[in-house]
Image (cartoon, grey):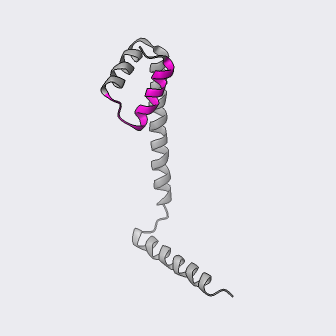
């Protein structure tokens, strides 16, 4: 039988990698009996979802310049050229 410490470790690991059959089974049995670890698992799931939404929001805000991708690429190239020219020819 897993301890709460072992179960919380597996819950965290499950966020990063698929658990093996024995790990999943042991965790399920522990969660069936332990209210605190079930609560921790729900909290970890909610936290992961919130972080995904925050990451998606940051991506959307990064692309909110209003410029089409082609224009952003032209600007990026022009700035890169300008930077390389100023580094090649100091005043």
Answer yes or no: is residue 42 visible.
no
Q: Hey, which residue is sitting farthest right in the picture?
A: 91
User: Where, by quadrant of the figure, is residue 7 drawn?
Assistant: top left
Whole-percent x and y of residue 76?
Answer: 49, 73
In the rendered image, residue 18 lying in the magenta stretch gets the answer yes
Whole-percent x and y of residue 60?
Answer: 46, 54
Taking 82 as reference, is 31 above or below it? above
Q: Which of 51/83 is in front? A: 83
Q: Residue drawn 50% across and 59% down?
A: 62
Q: Residue drawn 45% across and 68% down?
A: 67
Magenta portion: prevailing SS class? helix
Is 90 situated left or right of 44 in this image?
A: right
Q: Residue drawn 45% across and 76% down?
A: 74
Q: Which of 83/54 is in front? A: 83
Whole-percent x and y of residue 85?
Answer: 57, 84
Q: Hey, which residue is sitting farthest top in the picture?
A: 33
Taking 46 as reference, is 31 above or below it? above
Q: Which of 55/19 is in front? A: 19
The N terminus - image quarter = top left
Is 21 situated left or right of 34 in this image?
A: left
The C terminus - image quarter = bottom right
In the rendered image, residue 40 lying in the magenta stretch gets the answer no
Q: Which of 66/55 is in front? A: 55
Taking 87 as reference, is 3 above or below it? above
Q: Residue drawn 37% across and 19% down?
A: 26
Q: What stretch is highlighted in magenta?
A: 4-20
Count of labels in the image: 0
């Amino acid at each position: 039988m897993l301890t709460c410490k072992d179960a919380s470790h597996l819950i965290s690991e499950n966020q990063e990698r698929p658990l093996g059959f024995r790990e999943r089974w042991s965790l399920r049995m522990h969660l069936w009996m332990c209210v605190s670890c079930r609560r921790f698992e729900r909290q970890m799931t909610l936290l992961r979802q919130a972080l995904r939404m925050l990451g998606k929001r940051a991506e959307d805000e990064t692309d909110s310049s209003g410029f089409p991708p082609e224009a952003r690429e032209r600007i990026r190239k022009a700035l890169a050229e300008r930077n390389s020219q100023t580094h090649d020819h100091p005043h």
